[in-house]
Image (cartoon, helix red, strand yellow):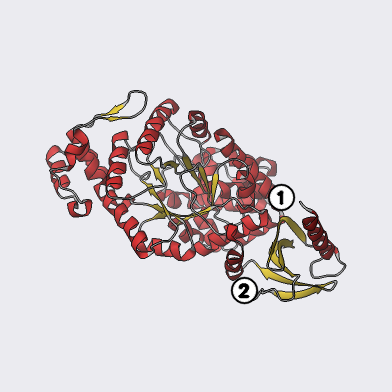
Amino acid sequence: MNEKERQTEEIILQSINYQNSPLSGTRLYKRSIHEDGGVTFFMIRNGISKQLVLWKRDQNADIQDFSGEQVEVNSLEFLLCDLSHENAAALRRRFEFTNPVRVGKHNSYGFGDRLGNAGPAHVRSVRGTGFKPVFAQQSIRELERTRRSAEDVLDAATWSVFQEGYHDGFGADGDHLKTTGDIDRMVSSGYTMFTIDPSDYVVDEAREMSEEELKAAFEELPWKDLEDSPDLLPGRFLKNPVKLQDGFKLVPTLEEVLRGMVKYGRVITHTKKMAAYLANQYPGYPSELELSVDETDDPTTLFEHYLVASELDRLGVELVSLAPRFCGHFEKGIDFKGDLDQFRDEYIQHLAIADIFGGYKLSIHSGSDKFSVYEVIGSIHGGAVHVKTAGTSYLEALRTLAEADPELFRQILAFSKKRFNEDKKTYHISADLDRVPDPFSLKENELPALLNDNDARQVLHVAYGSVLSGDEPEAKEFKSRLMEVLENHEELHENNLVHHFEKHLNPFI
């Protein structure tokens, strides 16, 4: 900090401590102090809410983009601004670092924030790790369940990086996009990463088809969109073995080629269509594509990965990352279940395939709390990885709630148990409801430990939409009450998050 910066901070603190001023009693976020065009910008906490403050040091400075309440403190003029969408958009026009960017083919981490208040802790967790962060990350499904907009999510990321003075760039991921309308929604909101979800086009039944059924389904693929023919395609994969790592070779049979194309052929054409739409409808727009094929019944074989990647490459679709369906089980909110030696061996070969086609990242979906997998990937020291988390930040909010407001936590857990059988339908999880105790039978000091229990974690995880939407009468005030507790216990909440994400990130460093 130079002398001018020290003087600015001192004047701001004096204004905050000035007796009976509109700023008195507020807390200054010191990293948020920034200068632009004769105006000093900074953020404060006023009670349980935050505000952006503009100190107009130059009388000719233009601050018309911002809306707020003008106040005077000891002859200094300030504008107190709510953290509205309009003010976030104005801030992005002023400060380039508050806008999302393409993160590229570097190690990166996705921090889903379903409540919109975990961002500052996410920034602190990733700072100095070498990972490129994606602070705005939300799937269409999450937006619908939490009743948030894509703009809400990006605004929360903007305020977080500004508050924490994070200038190293962050991504914004429109996750699990299925339609061109989804792309429109995310482009209009300023997102830079587009994760294509072609799960509706995966034909898992290919594995059970007879030879006759398989050949018929292969012939019926959309060959015009594939820019190919059923006579030519098999030969490209049968003629020359593909060398990967440690002498491993891909030597597919004709049956493997046919099954792979029947399973993923329309995935390839749908991805091509989505990529072409983004490029043609928004020429010059800064974007990067991830393909997610993790939501399938069976793991993605090495040949299937190669098949999809090579066909997309032939069709001119460039990926920044690809999420296969890895071996084992990547259930929500708990550690990996499966053979770690098998995962390691296959992951190394998946990396080799990615390297053939430009070195895109392997993306770990349902990446929350996969600590044993992090250890494996971190020990390989090769390739690039992208990890997606979301639900784990929500669970850390509930951990904070269990510590700070046990009664509300009991109510939310009891409600989550009631909702479990319905809400679990869209998830692959193994939680047993009978193993989750009645929260009203536990002592207060026993409640936080439930956030370390696999069954309780998954029950709480899958019910987040029901809890936050407030559709049912008993849940109507859950979100507002939860947010108030977290705002009143900001330090506890953020410490829980930072500690939790240090466990996520340290194995890679």
Say which residue label 1 marks.
Answer: 491
Q: Is residue 131 above or below residue 485?
A: above
Task: Specify the farthest residue to the top.
Answer: 247
The three-letter amino acid code for the residue at tag 1 is: Glu
Instruction: Name the residue located 52 percent from the left edge and 49 percent from the top edge.
Output: 390
Outermost residue on the right side: it is: 19
- Along the polypeptide, which appears first: circle 1 or circle 2? 2
The quarter in which the C terminus is drawn is: top right
Q: Quadrant of residue 47?
A: bottom right
Secondary structure at numbered mark 2: loop
Q: Position of residue 385 (x, y in %)?
A: 47, 40
Say if 55 sits above or below 287 in the image: below
In the rendered structure, the answer to whether residue 233 lies left or right of residue 348 reads left
Residue 393 vertical placement versus 140 (above, below) = above
| In this picture, residue 345 sits left or right of residue 122 | left
Q: From the viewer's side, name the closer residue of 426 and 285.
A: 285
Residue 270 x/y as whole percent = 29, 54
At 48% across and 29% down in the image, what residue appears?
380
Instruction: Give whichever of 350, 114 is nearer the camera.
Output: 350
Q: Nearer the viewer, residue 429 or 377?
A: 377
Q: Disc 2 designates what residue?
A: 65
Q: Residue at x 30, y 38 (%)?
A: 306
Say the numbered circle drawn on residue 213. Answer: none
Q: Nearer the viewer, mark 1 or mark 2?
A: 2
Mark 1 burial class by Cα count in 10 Å: few <14, some 14-19, many 20+? few
Q: Is residue 435 left or right of residue 70?
A: left
**SS class, disc 1:** helix
Amino acid type, mark 2: Asp
How packed is label 2: few (under 14 Cα within 10 Å), some, or many (20 or more)?
few
